[in-house]
Image: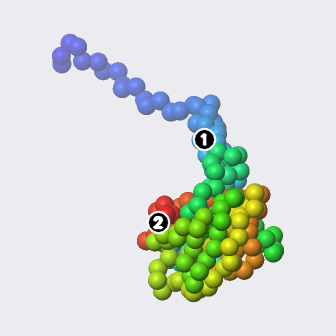
Amino acid sequence: MPENQNLADPPEPQRPNRASQVWSALSWVRDLAFSVLIAVILIVFIYQPVKVEGTSMMPALTDQERIFINKFTYHFGLGDIQRGDMVVFWFPLDPQKSYIKRVIGIPGDVISIDAGQVYVNRQALSEPYVPDEYRDRVSYEEHVVPAGQYFVLGDHRSSSSDSRTWGFVKRDAIYGKAVFVYWPLDKLGRIR
């Protein structure tokens, strides 16, 4: 038998003591609670999931799609509402309902529509987001968008209830900007 061989039993693997098991569980609970808190903050204050109902924003958004809207940008004045933004707002005739439309006119703009062609400040507006089959031939006499209000239209002009019918949208009624489609998965991506 070699001299250096140790005949003692190998040490038993150490079992975690009760205190380390409790600490590990508490760490896991802490991390889970922190994750839930971050998710709640994101959903309540920054991004909100919304279901699109109706066809007025086709083809950009279709009925029953799920999107995220950014509530933070407009709410805290970090971004101005721009022409072309898709905004979510409380419907002027029934503030219990939310609508989503595209901003066409901002405060001070002169808006008119001649047989379906939209004019902003007496210049024809190029609208590549409105396919020919979704256009209509409706006219709208010239109006100046009042301070603190917006002129909005649906992209599917022939099936949209919008500012042509019920007027301008007040700034304080606009609470979000449509930014991202998350369902169905084949439409996943940023909204343009």
Residue at image mark 2:
188
Q: Is residue 99 visible?
A: no
Q: Residues within 10 Å of mark 2 (few under 14, many from 20)?
A: some
Image point (46%, 65%), residue name: 188
- SS under mark 2: loop
The residue tagged 1 is 31
Residue 1, picture quadrant: top left
Q: Can residue 163 be seen in this view?
A: yes
Sort mark 1 into few (<14), some (14-19) or many (20+) by Cα contacts within 10 Å.
few
Q: Which amino acid type is marked by label 1?
A: Asp
Residue 155 image label: none
Residue 190 drawn at (x, y percent): 48, 61
The answer to whether residue 168 is left or right of residue 31 is right
Q: 44 or 30: which is nearer to us? A: 44
Residue 100 lies, with reference to residue 22, above or below; the image says below
Q: In this view, does 84 lie to the left or right of 176?
A: left
Q: Which residue is drawn at 36% across and 25% down?
A: 9
Percent position (x, y) of residue 62? 54, 77
**Residue sticking out furthest to the top:** 3
- Label 1 sits on a secondary structure element that is helix
